Image: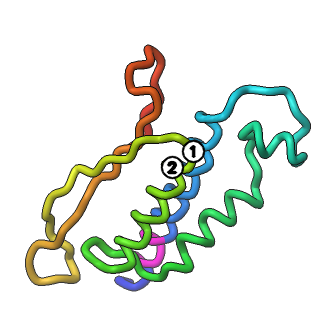
Amino acid sequence: MSRRLWLFSGLGAAGLVGGALVIFSYVNAKPQRTEVGTPEARKAGAFDGERAVTYVTSICEIGPRMSGTEGMKKQQELIQKHFEKHGATVTYQKFEGKQPSRDGAVPMANMIVSWHPKADRRVIIC
């Protein structure tokens, strides 16, 4: 049962991160009227299922990504690079926490991604 829980947790986290990547790409895009699936639509930030699968696949290819592991560090670097490429500022809220599979505290971090922090209208995804 424990392995299934970790598998579903990992897939859920990968899906959440992949979805956030797609959403943040969309939020950062300039609105345009285009046909879905065309190169113009991709540039405009329209939802593209193939692109979303590519994001999630890239994260899953890293392998296990439990807190405090090299896999988690690689995932954070991948996501940070993506957001910075799209004009975001990335900061980390670092702390130590308990990882159930480890004896003692491990380094953890909340990633904070911002575009136009002084804007009146904001989107927050947690």
Which residue sits at x=46%, y=33%?
A: 115
| Label annotation for residue 86 | 1
Q: Is residue 8 inside the magenta stretch?
A: yes
Quarter of image, res 69: bottom left
| Residue located at (43% from left, 68% from top) | 75
The kind of secondary structure element at disc 1 is: loop
Crowd class of label 1 (few under 14; some 14 to 19; many from 20; radius 10 Å): few
From this view, report whether residue 47 is shown above or below residue 31. Answer: below
Q: Which residues are magenta?
A: 5-10
Q: Seen in the image, is 99 located left or right of residue 37?
A: left
- Say if 115 sits above or below 2 in the image: above
Q: Position of residue 63 (x, y in %)?
A: 47, 82
Q: Which mark is residue 96?
A: none
Left-right relation of 12 to 25: left
The part of the image, by quadrant, that contains residue 126 is top left
Tell me the amino acid under the disc marked 2: Phe
Nearer to the camera, 36 or 116:
116
